[in-house]
Every structure is written in C-alpha cells, then in structure tokens.
Amino acid sequence: MAATKRNTTGRDFDVVIVGSGLIGSTLAVALGGAGLRVALMDRLDPATMVDEPFDGRASAVSHASRRALDAIGVWRHLADDAQPILDIRVSEGDSPLFLHYDHNELGDGPLGFMLENRHLRRGLGAAISTTANIELFAPAELSALDRSGTAAVVRLAGGEVLRGRLVAAADGRASPLRQAAGIRVHGWSYAQSGIVCTVTHERPHRGIAHERFFPAGPLAILPLTGDRSSLVWTEPSAVAGRLIELDKPAFDDEMRDRFGDFLGYVVSVGPRWSYPLALHNAKTYRSRRLALVGDAAHAMHPIAGQGLNLGFRDVAALAEVVVDAARLGLDIGGTDILSRYETWRRFDSMVLLAVTDGLNRLFSNDISAARVARDAGLAAVNRMPPLKRLFMRHARGTVGKLPRMLRGMAP
Amino acid sequence: MPGSRTARERPGRATRSASVDPEEIRRFSEVAEAWWDADGPFRALHRLNPTRLAYLRRHLDARFERAPRDIHPYCGLTVLDAGCGGGLLSEPLARLGARVTAIDADSRAIDVAASHARDAGLDIDYRRAAVEEVAANGETFDIVVAMEIIEHVPDLPAIVDAFGRVAAPGGVLALATLNRTLKSFALAVVGAEYVMRWLPRGTHRWEKFVKPSEVARHLRRHGFTVADVTGVTLDPLAFEWRTSRDTSVNYMMFANKTATR
C-alpha cells in the first residue's frame, strides 16, 4: 500500500475497537479477517475474562449468528461446547396453554445454540490469535480520544497513541465513549434483576428450552451440554438480592419451587450472579468517526435471549459497510458509511426492543384480563402457523435484510 | 458559494494548453475550498464516487488479474489521475495501493488536494500540470484516469493524443464524461445546474459534450481499444447513481492500450 507519512506520532490502524468483550472481539475478527488493521483494546486482561467467576452467563446464539461466527472462522472453536436448541416451549407458570416452537417446523437444523460466555470468550480469543492484523492492547486504560481530525486519535494511559479512521465503541451498556460523545439513550430500568446460575438435573433436557412467565418475571431454562441447564430467573431486584444471598440448600429450595421436577431432581452448581435488567436504545449509533455496537448501542430485556444476537447483527452490518468501503478505497470513517450502518441497524433494534419490552410487561403482572388475553394469545399464535413461523424466524434471527455474514459469507 | 470571495482576490493560475480552458479552470477554482465538503457544491460528485470506484475496480481487477476482495489490490501499479480536482478519486486509488500522480490545471484545487491527503496520511504526487506536460516529460502510467474532464477541454484530439502517450503499453484508460444528447442538455445542464442546483451554474457547456462514438474514434487512433462503455444514471429520489445501459447522459468508458507501441 502507499507509504504513509504523518506529522504526529502514533501507530496507524484502520479501526480501533474499544472493548474486547464478545461483540468487540467478534468485530475484530470480522474486520481483521478482511484485511483491515485492527487495534482491539480493553481495560481488562483478556486472560481473566475466560474465568468462570468473571461471567457465568450463557448466551443463546441464533441460527443466523452461528452462520456469522462460522463465516469468520470462530464457530469451529465453539462447536464442541454448543448445545443445540431443538425446541422452545413458552408457558405461563403452570398454565396448560403454551406456545411451542419446534425446529422440525422450519427444517434446516436447530433453532439456535446455547453457549456459556466463557466458551465464547475462549473461542473468540483463539480466533483473534490466529487472525493477522489484530493487535491487542489489554489491559490498557483509554486516557483521551480526539475525533476531530481526518483520523481519530486514541491515547492510552501508558502514553501509547493509536490512530484509526474509525473507532468502534464496544464498551458495553454504560459505554464511556457513548457518554463522552454526548449521545443520549432513551430507556428505563425494570426494577427487576436476573439471577443467573447453572443447574444439573437427573433427566436429559433433550435440547428443549423453556420460557415460563410468572407474575414476578420470566424464568428461562436453557439447555447446556450434558445434563445441565442455564437458569435465568427474573425477580424484583429486592427479592433477587435476598435470593442471591441465601445459602445453597435454601437457594436450591426456592429454585426448585419455580423450576418444578419435570427434569427430576435439580441442584445448582457453581457460583450465582445477579444482573439488574434495563432497556435502552441510543438516540444515534454514530458520531464523527465513531460507531456504537452491541450493548453500547442498545441493551434489552433478556427475555427473548436476543441481546447478543442483536449485537452480532451490528457487527455483521458494520463489518459489511466498512469492508465494502475499504474495497473501494473510501474513507471507512466517513459520514456516509456510518450513516449506512445506522440506517441498517437502528430500526431493527428498536422493533426488537419494543417487542421484548411488550412481552415482559404483558406477562409481569397478575391482572386477570391480561392473563386471559395472553393465554389465549399464546394458544392462538400456536394455531396460526404463518404467524408462528414469523416469530420463530425472529428467534432464529433470519428476518430482515441480512448482512452477508448472517447469510454465512465472509464480510 | 464557499470560497468565491477569495477567488476574486486570488484567482487560480492556469496554463494555456490544448487541455486547459482558463475560463473553465476559473469556475472550478472559485469553489476549490469546498472540494471535500460532502454537502457542498461537489455533493453530486461525492455521491457519484462509490459508483465510479466500483466500476474502476471491476474493470481494473479483471485487466490486472486482482482479487476483488483484496483491499490493497493495486500495489505495484502507477496511476495518473488527470483532472484530479480536490483528489476525490486520487485518495481512494492511493488507499487501494497504487502510486498515484494527480494533476489539475487549477492550482487552488491542487493545494486543497495536497493538504487533504497529507492530513489523511496518504502519499500522493500532486502537481499543477496539464496532461500534455506530463506526456512531454516522457512519464508513463499503468492506469490513466480522466473523470469528467474531456467535456471541459478545448481540444479533444490533442488530449486523447496525450492520453495515448502517458498510458504505458498494456496500460488502461478510464474516463467518464457527458454525452451530447438532447436529454443530457435537459438533465445535466438545465436540470442539475439551474433547477436542482446540484452543481454550480456554468459547470457544463453542452456544446463541448462528447458522444461515445466520437471518443472511441479518437481513442482508436491513439492505440486504445475500447473494452466497455457503461451509462451512469441518477435516481433523483434516492439521490443515488447507478450504472446502467443508458449512456444518453453520463457514461464511463474503459479502454486498453495495446501492449506494444
């Protein structure tokens, strides 16, 4: 490539990604694999992120997200630890009416996969280390970001200077970069928390995921490899705080009360975590030479298991517009490029956020009219194959104009 | 119009030659500061750039056997961007790996282009020069690009002759221009400049527009074979340019220089 010369010192990259979580790392692999020079930075040491105490959550990886991960060479590091979801059963408490998503109705493989986040992090780490063009700066503290020029200049606390034509903010829900750019979010917190833990059970789950709605909030039972499931148990934050403090026998008693015995005797294993639930959508996903991805752009209620998949869609769309621009020699941080990304992503996120919020509100109350409506609604959806297929395709992440990665192609 | 006041105080110097019309250069010089303003007087050109670059990539990749997915495909190739203006096309070609020499008769455009490339960290050889001057030096290039300039020059055969001399044997010439049809008069001159104000008034003079057959005839005389003629049409609602079979207003042409002189 043409020689570069600059007045200011600093290392040159095409893209500087701030935040090496699941979304930042996936973006790095997608862009690095296409030949772009990527700096990936994080406050935390990546080695600590794969420890189970760091992140005990498990994620539902939709069919489309799996294709995207496969397209950029990440899936082969994950396949062994992925539990296929063959069936999703949605019910209300012990109500007999329920919505049943069966992968046989769609053909074409499982509805999605359950993966523990630590496995996702490890797999992405393996992909990063084998992708040329990605340089990791972690642990590293960002001390200043100047986006005013023809390149964004990132200063690290250690004195190092990174220059990139585009900065991707993958720095999470509280996104310091989003706040520094003055981008506001609209959203609210639910005063609910999600308790997350892993359980083992006597009987095999047969790849079936369960979503049960209780007045206090939904309980999701998500199949993991072996006779294990990941539990996402939503309660008002005050209740969740008390539950998480209980000793193991007392916690397990409470847990069995909700879980039931359909998988035989159930016990929790390993640590448990509690995450406050909140929903937000950034008012814009871009600023000068800055793009927001993943939770920095939008965070949602985990009810439909779509948060991470929504983030993967951001990655696929941003990688595509950036790589397309790079192949034409265009300025990848240019306004028109970032505006294409935003147009592509923001509406989609808004719809999904509204739907999942609506679901939660509909189910998180005990008014009998609403109860009748939702019971009837679930049963009605079940009897209307086209509508149900649409919901299922949403769950699989195959609705809307799909970026190349989500269709299984490299960006 | 940005820069118009300073333009009167410090008009761009222009050389007198077959490819340079001082009056035409003055009109561009007046708005030189605005070359990189994507919403300024060159907005239409900014919108056209991705379409032009995609066309160039398709034909250059085929001609020089480069991988379409490569992001630095033109390493080792030299480019002459004739009539580079602010460098809207020179910079992408440099990013794609080519060694770019870019010339324009308007010294103010060259100043703007050089300063912008320096900020962007791109090494581009910008010169205020006419194509004939480069040809007179005996310099040759693998790729000669002449976008929207032949409709602005006083002597078409002379500039095509210069293209023939600066294109290396086995090299290529890519050009874009406006057809001389009733439709182009209505759309490019009256529509774009007077009605929609997409372009500064007086940007184009219809009588200087060139039919594809005329360009092809001149090119053949100077050792080129025309490989492709593609129309470019504007979707006025999306304000987006698309390649098309309709060459009646804007068109691009890709020609191969014979391998031997």
Image (cartoon, helix red, strand yellow):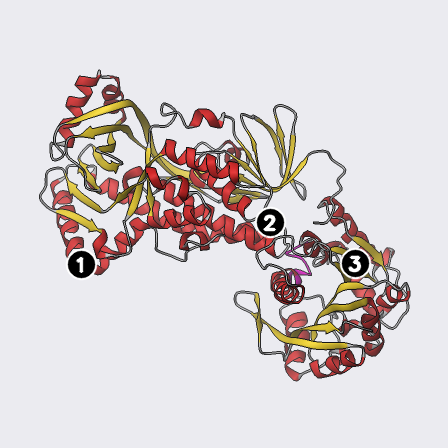
Q: Position of residue A213 (x, y in %)?
A: 18, 38
Task: Give the residue pinned by disc 2.
Answer: A332
Range shown magenta: B37-45
Q: Position of residue A113 (x, y in %)?
A: 30, 43
Query: Is residue B63 in view?
Result: yes
Task: Give the residue pinned by disc 3.
Answer: B102
Magenta-drawn stretch contains B41 = yes
How far separated are the C-alphas under marks 2 and 1?
Answer: 45 Å
Q: Earlier in the sequence, mark 2 or mark 1?
A: 2
How far separated are the C-alphas under marks 3 and 1?
Answer: 64 Å
Dividing the picture into quadrants, the one containing residue B165 is bottom right
Q: Which numbered circle lies on residue A384?
A: 1
Q: Are marks 2 and 1 in contact (CB under 8 Å)?
A: no
Q: Is residue B6 above or below residue B18?
A: above
Q: Is residue B73 above or below residue A147?
A: below
Dividing the picture into quadrants, the one containing residue A380 is bottom left
Horizontally, is B196 left or right of A315 in the view? right
Same-chain status of marks 2 and 1: yes
Same-chain status of marks 3 and 2: no
